[in-house]
Image (spheres, grey):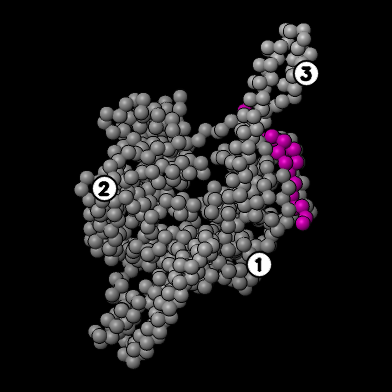
């Protein structure tokens, strides 16, 4: 195992804030390292040092002569009007056949490869950057929050890429699921010190908690011993007969030292609004079409969300998740059909368009007092502000000077002070550090109202969602399985090479019934009957496989194997549903013929 890069005695500060304090670390070839630490700890600064974009005040970065760094850029490096193929050729200097071959690993084919990059979603543009990065043949990848704003399909594709990349990587991310799947080691930056842990992020977090508990127990024992010795010394040092014993105990006392435990950094402590639980439907979507005056995003939506559910809206970027949420809260009008909320539903909204349009003239305190339910005491407002890290003079800050993360926390605090029994949350984890997100999850698990949300954070989704609504191919529907089963299905699609279906045009999609008639109207009835028989065989085989897996699941005693079987069953049920739906459509077309 060769050393690619060594950080030795690194010192770096901004003003009074020390980011690196005699920090040391070694990166070796083929090892992928998850780089973690609180917001503002200095992770991105260290990446810039490694890229020679900033200098250390003291210390060295020693690079192996063969080191070749590949950096995933967050900004868009594309020229106006160029295609993915043209960009990869320009950026890497490789011939078109080589660029096309590597692009194919990321499903960049046809219009996705040869059409304009400007027509691609952010997730597909990230694929273009990754393909171009690979063409440079780096032996160390530096990735700074690579999953930000990527849909789950592209996140999983990135995971697959990293698992097959047999070189080294240093990955900065708050996404625990992503780090767990891709990184064997964990590098922690806390109070200027770098600590390399030879294990995955979840093992590191357990080790970190256990180490702290161990140190606290040791300190408690030492302090009890110190107290006992001090009591003996105070009682006996004045007596001639016991003075020598007291001096001996004094030397013991001097040798007893407690372990220094760094004081906790401020952490948000979010408390859920107290609401009365309700039963029955919270909202019904009937024959709903969503979108904009010149573009229908999705139609024929028939979904019901029950009170008390935590419904996660999922789907690839550009398919309409945020459009659906905005239609639910009436910041967009339905293009057709209805959204009907239940009686006495009080809806609180957390979204980009909300915390991006705050009145910047208000202070933190003025905003929270405005949002609070009438009758809320001043002390209660201050308590909620403090729970989201607005303490002391910070409550008098003007909104115009707040960072993106502070504005996000302020909007969250406003929701907690309201009377809302429905929370609609669009990417609530954006701009929040991992500790604040974890506190938010705990609060929402205790919340007895209804939550409708979307998020790219799989850890957040997995812990919170009780049911899944998928927006895909111009419609939205309840997905039968849980979030793990949904992820399993996406993985299966990617492994089988099925293209993620992002529309490149903005043309409204036709209703399902129109599409079916369009595809079968000119088909020979004998061919339809042949396809029906083929579908019937497929349905029987799928159902037989599902029964066999269910039998294995019922007798399985290993938790990990049982979860894998459960996900396989759910994926088969979804395949079965697709096949049955196609059989019904073809049967209806045959009868109509």
- Work out how far the residue at label 2 is from the one at label 3, CA to CA, in angstroms: 69 Å
Residue 69 located left or right of residue 179:
right
Callout 3: SS: helix
User: For residue 570, what is the image quadrant?
Assistant: bottom left
Would you name the residue on which mark 3 appears? 248
Callout 2: SS: loop
Closer to the N terminus: mark 2 or mark 3?
A: 3
Q: Quadrant of the N terminus?
A: bottom right
Residue drawn at point x = 26 percent, y = 51 percent: 279
Closer to the N terminus: mark 1 or mark 2?
A: 1
Look at the image and tell me whether residue 191 can be seen: no
Residue 120 located left or right of residue 357:
right
Look at the image and tell me whether residue 443 can be seen: yes
Please rate how many residues cluster around mark 3, counting C-alpha atoms within 10 Å: few if below 14, some from 14 to 19, many from 20.
few
Task: Tell me where the magenta segment starts and ends, as one range.
Answer: 1-24
Q: Quadrant of the C terminus?
A: bottom left
Would you name the residue on which mark 1 appears? 94
Callout 1: SS: loop
Residue 22 located left or right of residue 285:
right
Where's residue 51, x and y in %? 67, 48
Would you name the residue on which mark 2 appears? 278
Magenta stretch encompasses residue 7: yes
User: For residue 401, what is the image quadrant?
Assistant: top left
């Amino acid at each position: 195992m060769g050393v690619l890069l060594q950080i030795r005695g690194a010192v770096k500060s901004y003003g009074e804030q020390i980011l690196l304090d005699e920090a040391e670390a070694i990166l070796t070839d083929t090892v992928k390292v998850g780089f973690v630490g609180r917001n503002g700890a200095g992770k991105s600064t260290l990446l810039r040092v490694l890229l020679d974009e900033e200098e250390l005040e003291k210390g060295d970065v020693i690079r192996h002569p063969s080191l070749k760094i590949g950096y995933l850029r967050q900004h868009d490096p594309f020229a106006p009007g160029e295609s993915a193929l043209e960009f990869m050729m320009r950026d890497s200097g490789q011939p078109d056949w080589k660029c096309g071959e590597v692009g194919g690993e990321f499903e960049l084919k046809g219009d996705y490869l040869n059409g304009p990059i400007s027509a691609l979603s952010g997730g597909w543009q990230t694929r273009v950057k990754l393909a171009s990065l690979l063409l440079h043949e780096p032996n160390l990848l530096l990735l700074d929050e690579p999953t930000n704003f990527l849909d789950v399909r592209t996140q999983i594709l990135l995971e697959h890429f990293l698992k097959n990349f047999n070189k080294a990587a240093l990955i900065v991310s708050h996404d625990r699921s992503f780090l767990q799947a891709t990184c064997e080691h964990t590098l922690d930056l806390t109070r200027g010190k770098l600590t390399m842990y030879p294990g995955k992020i979840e093992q590191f977090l357990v080790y970190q908690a256990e180490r702290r508990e161990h140190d606290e127990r040791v300190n408690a024992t030492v302090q009890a011993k110190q107290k006992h010795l001090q009591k003996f010394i105070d009682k006996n040092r004045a007596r001639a007969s016991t003075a020598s014993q007291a001096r001996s105990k004094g030397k013991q006392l001097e040798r007893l030292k407690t372990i220094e435990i760094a004081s906790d950094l401020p952490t948000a402590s979010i408390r859920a609004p107290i609401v009365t639980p309700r039963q029955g439907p919270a909202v019904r979507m009937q024959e709903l079409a969503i979108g904009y005056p010149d573009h229908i995003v999705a139609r024929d939506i028939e979904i019901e969300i029950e009170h008390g559910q935590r419904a996660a809206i999922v789907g690839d970027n550009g398919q309409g998740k945020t459009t659906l949420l905005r239609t639910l809260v009436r910041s967009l009008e339905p293009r057709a059909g209805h959204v009907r909320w239940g009686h006495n539903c009080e809806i609180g909204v957390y979204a980009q368009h909300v915390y991006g349009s705050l009145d910047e003239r208000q202070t933190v305190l003025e905003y929270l007092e405005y949002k609070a339910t009438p009758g809320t005491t001043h002390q209660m407002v201050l308590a909620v502000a403090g729970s989201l890290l607005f303490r002391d003079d910070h409550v008098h800050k003007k909104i115009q000077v707040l960072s993106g993360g502070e504005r996000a926390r302020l909007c969250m605090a406003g929701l907690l002070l309201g009377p809302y029994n429905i929370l609609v949350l669009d990417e609530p984890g954006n701009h929040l550090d991992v500790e604040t997100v974890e506190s938010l999850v705990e609060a929402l698990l205790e919340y007895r109202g209804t939550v409708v949300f979307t998020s790219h954070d799989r850890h957040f989704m997995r812990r919170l969602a009780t049911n899944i609504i998928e927006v895909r191919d111009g419609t939205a529907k309840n997905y039968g399985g849980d979030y793990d089963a949904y992820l399993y299905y996406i993985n299966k699609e990617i492994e089988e090479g099925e293209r993620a279906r992002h529309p490149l045009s903005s043309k409204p999609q036709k209703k399902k019934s129109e599409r079916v008639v369009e595809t079968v109207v000119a088909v020979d009835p004998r061919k339809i009957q042949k396809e029906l028989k083929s579908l019937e065989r497929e349905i029987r085989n799928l159902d037989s496989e599902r029964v066999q897996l269910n039998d294995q699941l019922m007798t399985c005693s290993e938790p990990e194997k049982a979860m894998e079987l459960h996900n396989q069953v759910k994926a088969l049920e979804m395949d079965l549903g697709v096949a049955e739906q196609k059989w019904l459509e073809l049967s209806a077309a045959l009868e109509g013929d």
